[in-house]
Amino acid sequence: VQLQASGGGLVHPGGSLRLSCGASGRSLRLYAVGWFRQAPGKEREGVSCISARDQSTYYADAVRGRFIISRDNAKNTVDLQMNSLKPEDTATYYCVTGLRVLCTSDWHRNEYDHWGQGTLVTVSS
């Protein structure tokens, strides 16, 4: 299984970006998929997770109301629409998946077998 995250870049505060996580060797629609981020000098943070069966979602408090996670099963991707971006959203974003089907409230504490290579998001004026 290989995951590839894309869509990062430089954006002004208040702007939007759409990240995409694609996979080879796995149908993402069958598994929970999450996004983490890590800023320089900071701990890794769970951003959002989407379940496979009921499409339930979880968001970190810092991004709730601004970010939307969704699936595009035709493309075998999980996307993260990021709106109203702030400088503190600057980080490398990673998509993850494992054997779990459902996200739970502690999804960000689980171990994941597969990580994308990361895509850098920079929010700056």
Image (cartoon, rainbow, N blue to C red):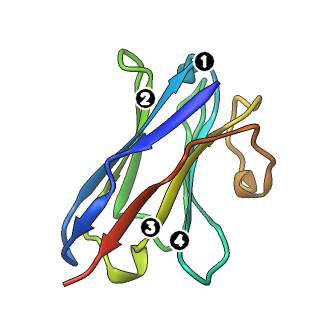
Q: Residue at x 26, y 56 (%)?
A: 17
Q: Label 4: which residue?
A: 61
In-image side of 75 versus 125 (left or right) = right
Query: Splitting the image into 4 quarters, where does residue 13 fall?
Result: bottom left
Q: For mark 4, give the secondary structure.
A: loop
Q: Nearer the viewer, mark 3 or mark 1?
A: 1
Give the mark nearest the N terminus, 1 or 2.
1
Give the mark nearest the N terminus, 3 or 2.
3
Q: Amino acid at mark 4?
A: Asp
- Residue 6 percent coordinates (x, y): 38, 44
Q: Amino acid at mark 1?
A: Arg
13 up-or-down from 98: above or below: below
Q: For mark 2, give the secondary structure.
A: strand
Q: Residue at x 60, y 18 (%)?
A: 26
Q: Amino acid at mark 2?
A: Thr
Residue 120 seen in the figure? yes
Q: Label 2: which residue?
A: 77
Q: For mark 1, give the secondary structure.
A: loop
Quick check: marks 1 and 4 in contact, CB under 8 Å?
no
- Residue 21 percent coordinates (x, y): 45, 37
Q: Label 3: which residue?
A: 63
- Residue 11 percent coordinates (x, y): 21, 69
Query: Splitting the image into 4 quarters, where does residue 16 fall?
Result: bottom left
Viewer-closest of 52 and 95: 95
Q: Label 1: which residue?
A: 26
Give the mark nearest the N terminus, 3 or 1.
1
